[in-house]
Amino acid sequence: MTFLHPEFFYLMLPPVLVLFYFILTQKEPAAELFSGPVFERLRVNEKRLSLRQRNLIYLLIFILLIAAMSQPVITEATAVVKAPDEALTVAVDISASMQTEDVYPSRAAVAKAKLLALVARAKRERIGVLAFGRDVYAVVPPTADRTALTELLNDFTPDAYAEKGTDIMALLAAANGVMGEPGRKNLLLLTDGGDRGDFSEAVSYAQAQKLHIYILGIGTVEGGVLKQDGKPVMQGEKPVRTVLNPSLRTLAESTGGLYVDMTVGSRDVTALLSELRRHAGGGERGVKEIRLYGQLYILPLGAALFLLLLANASMSRRERVAVPPALLLGVLLSGNAAVLRAEPFDYELLESAKGYYEQGDYTRAARAFYRYGVHNGNDPAAMYDSAHALYRAGKYDAAAALWERIRSKERMLQFSTLHNLGNARAMLGGRENLEAAIKVYQKALYLQNDSQTRENMAIVRGRLMRLVQAERHRTAAAATGTGGDHNASGAPSPTNGAQNASAQTETPEGNEARPSEASGKAKTAALSDYEAAMWRQSLQRQSRTHLYKITPERAGGGDHVVPW
């Protein structure tokens, strides 16, 4: 056993001992008036604890509390974490010229693909991402977590911004301030370079700040027509053409970096990464040992509480309290098994539920969330999470039944419950469930006028209309004797719609409520091309990364707000 914070012993124990020395050595007020034997005869309730004995118990209580604050632990497991050595800042050009389609599908799309390829290969580096055009924005702070970095970059859409202008000096000043650490500063640009031909000011600044610039040129020498909203940008009667800036090579090589033209495949990314590592020399920034402890503070804390009760009760030292054996036996035999059974702490149950959910074990996560909710008086948030996990497991019927039971005064939780209840009903399919889904969506819209809920309801209404029409067609065909077995479930499924709407509706624990694939019981079909395009546009609009704007001094860097 060890103490994580032994300083509590050093700082608190000496003054406590000094204080109790004076308390224990002083006499009772009445003892000043009588001699010892006389005072003992006059003492009332001599069978109770004396003041001295009670003060000794208080001293022991203080010592136990100090021990609890010192956090006694036992080591259960250890893990060694190796931190990467080099930090790499990547800047993606989001200027309007990156919308040019001289490379397929566009320069912006190719830049994002190259960035994701770099992240997949850079296993040792900590990577941070900036976006720049006329201004500079923070996209992702420096991190070695490849999973989180990839997910964030998947939501990043550089072609959604298209700022006019490319300010390289603003980027260098912002990047220098963001990196702000000793050692080699590496900045990788994914850009077409804009239309500026002289980078001498940028080169001087980079050399002064020991900033090494690596550039992956995105575009072609022949260039292409600049477009805005799908239409060519005209200058007079001629369309504006943008080409890959040839001065980018001078900018990179003058700062001790490297310029590489984009290629089909990943040879360009591999070449840049190899050059970066050649200068870095490999290695690790540090090796840290992380230990998992078992907490023991509850033992001295519990003992202190027991002694506090004993000192305040001042029980007799000689009298015995007889408890009938029959009473003890009756308590043991009549005790409820659920009460006698040992249960984990609520926080442990909640942590295990989150762990199951992150591992994809949604069935066990649903059970754990449900148990936590029952232990806390049918907690609405826990019941919501349990239903959400059932939804992810494909158990739409059970999820809908649990969502219908939730009662909460929190308006946002009410809206989220109704929204996802509508999704679950829509996933079950059938005329009755589709009608129920529409009614639930209407209740949700009464609480919050949400665009995704309205779009979901429109999809379900269209599907219900086609289902009713198919039923009428079958009925008419049967009446006329023409037959014909038409599939009533040929209407598009709200699966993708529910997925987008649920992706917008977050659980109280911060996890996104993304629905799983349709189960075998749900009679669904694929979306039409129009509906699929509508949902893709909606998803892009809802999941767009909101960038943090950096405002550095244009000349010479200077102080500015550091976003991470």
Image: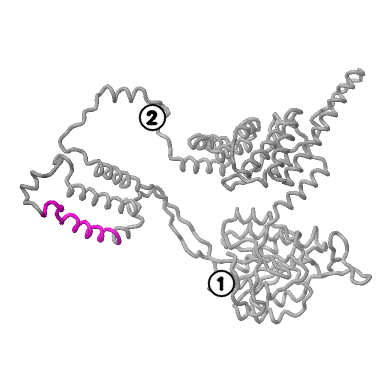
Query: Compared to 149, does 218 lie above or below?
Result: below
Q: Is residue 347 magenta?
A: no
Work out whether residue 400 can be spotted. yes
Residue 71 percent coordinates (x, y): 35, 52
Instruction: Judge the density around disc 1: few (<14), some (14-19), many (≥20) Cα neighbours within 10 Å.
Output: few
Residue 511 horizontal side relative to residue 18, left or right: right
What's drawn in magenta, residue-wise?
11-32
Q: Vertical placement of 445 versus 185: above or below?
A: above
Furthest toward the right, the residue is: 237
Instruction: Give the numbered dot on residue 281.
Output: none
Nearest the viewer among 424 and 315 is: 315
What is the crowding at mark 2: few (fewer than 14 residues within 10 Å), some, or many (at least 20)? few
* Front-most of residues 271 and 226: 226
Labelled disc at residue 180:
1
Task: Kindly identify which residue carries mark 2.
Answer: 340
Dominant secondary structure of the residues highlighted in magenta in the image: helix
Residue type pointed to by label 1: Gly
Residue at image position (65%, 61%) is 139
